[in-house]
Image (cartoon, rainbow, N blue to C red):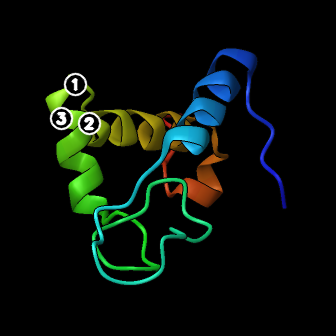
Amino acid sequence: MPAVLPLPLATLVRKLLVNRRGKAKIGTPDDGPWLLPGGQPGRPLSDSQIGLWFHKIGIRPQQARSTALFTLVTELPADVSGRTSST
């Protein structure tokens, strides 16, 4: 299923798709369906490598993930999230 991305991000992803290259030296020249091809033919870049890549450019994915999860939990009803009301 195609992903719908907002315009600035969609433009960057299209550029990445055109210029992407895997690190694999053995195997087929096609990197497969991966947006971020990894070091093994036909495999994506690992999550730890992506984390290191983001860290180098100043993006802290773990902080963003924690904030997003906290925000989602605060939007859930109390009976779903396990929160108790202070009445």
User: Alpha-carbon neighbours of circle 3 within 10 Å: few (<14), some, or many (≥20)?
Assistant: few
Q: Which is more toward the observer, 81 or 28?
A: 28
The amino acid sitting under disc 3 is His
Whether 33 is drawn above or below 61: the answer is below
Residue at image mark 3: 55
Pointer 1 and pointer 2: residues touching (CB < 8 Å)? Answer: yes
The Cα–Cα distance between marks 1 and 2, rounded to whole angstroms, is 5 Å
Pointer 3 and pointer 2: residues touching (CB < 8 Å)? Answer: yes
Residue at the spot x=43%, y=62% of the render?
37
Q: Which is more toward the observer, 27 or 38?
A: 27
The image shows residue 21 at horizontal and vertical percentages of 42, 53
Disc number placed over residue 57 in the picture, else none: 1
Q: Which is more toward the observer, 35 or 21?
A: 21
Residue at image mark 2: 54
Q: Quadrant of the N terminus?
A: bottom right
Quadrant in the rendering for residue 43: bottom left
The amino acid sitting under disc 2 is Phe
Residue at the spot x=22%, y=25% of the render?
57
The amino acid sitting under disc 1 is Ile
The Cα–Cα distance between marks 3 and 2, rounded to whole angstroms, is 4 Å
